[in-house]
Amino acid sequence: MTENIIRTVIITKSTDECKDIKTLSFNMKEENTNYIPPKPGQFVMIWVPGVDEIPMSISDCDINGNWSITVKNIGECTNAIYNLKEGDFIGVRGPLGNWFELPEEKSKNIFLIGGGIGMAPLRFLTQELYKHKFSFILIQGAKIKSELMFTTQFQMLDKNSTDIFYCTEDGSYGTEGIVTLAFERILETYSKRLHSNAITYTCGPEKMIYSIYEICEKWNIELHASLERIMRCGCGLCGLCAIDPLGLLVCKDGPVFKTESLKKMEDFGKYKRDFTGRKVKL
């Protein structure tokens, strides 16, 4: 379910995650008779009056209706959001889009693979998997140690049901290299019988996602990937998030797409649209 009404909320908490990245929390349940709890993978449109409205993944939610978004300071609107303080107001529209569907079987071999700000929806997903008593393997990648996200929260997960692997390109923490190399090394320790019972969830830079897709195709592993595109509306009107040749809209048909759709996307891993609607290389 989704909600397309802008609600004005107060920032209740601001947490520094790492360099140029913060998590902001707010309550969406108070005085909201039509409250719809979000699911992992869904997003919200965040409105900063006088600046812009942009899509952002939901990185956390609790039973009391406290939601979180995690923002990287990289542009005009993200800078405005990043600099919000506790007590400031913000406009929130959502939850929007589809979500990461949890496996039907507890016996599934589950992989979560993310990089950069793409860890935001995966953090929310880890909470749901943990709550429903799924075991899983989490692989997070970053260029350097100081860019790794949510490490404190991940350390609190039960180590009997969760394996966490960190990769840094400079080798400053965890394994030196990128997440795709770590993913392949881990898969090589499994038998082929286990590959057919595996499922992978991923979010991050699309070139990384495409490489994970190729690995999953090689090992016959089901993939659920969260894609990112420019969005003006978040509800299927502007068309900037359309993916050829299917015409699927990331805001309405996604942002999470499964293997069968990814196979048919000519744009996947190659192109996106700019603010004019023109295709540009990733």
Image (tube, grey):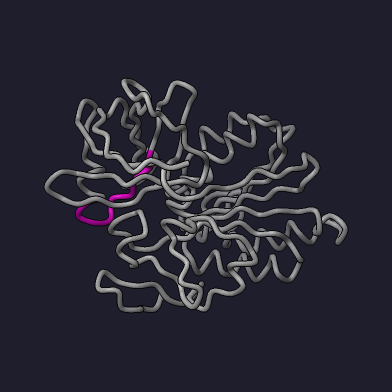
Magenta span of residues? 69-77
As rendered, which of 79 and 223 lies closer to the eye?
Answer: 223
For the image shown, how many numbered marks are present on the structure?
Answer: 0
- Quarter of the image for the C terminus: give it: bottom left
Residue positioned 45% across, 53% down in the render: 116
Q: Can residue 189 be seen in this view?
A: no
Report x, y in % for residue 77.
22, 51
Q: Is residue 250 above or below residue 90?
A: below
123 horizontally vs 32: left or right: right
Residue positioned 21% across, 25% down in the render: 87
Q: Can residue 88 be seen in this view?
A: yes
Residue positioned 88% across, 58% down in the render: 193
258 horizontally vs 228: left or right: right
Q: Is residue 256 above or below residue 25?
A: below
The answer to whether residue 202 is magenta is: no
Report x, y in % for residue 103.
70, 45
The answer to whether residue 75 is magenta is: yes
Q: In this view, does 44 lie above or below 67?
A: below
Report x, y in % for residue 182.
66, 59
As rendered, which of 226 and 218 lies closer to the eye?
Answer: 226
As rendered, which of 30 and 147 lies closer to the eye?
Answer: 30
Q: In which quarter of the image is residue 181?
A: bottom right
Residue positioned 76% across, 65% down in the render: 220
Furthest-left residue in this view = 50
Report x, y in % for residue 187.
76, 59
Q: In which quarter of the image is residue 223?
A: bottom right
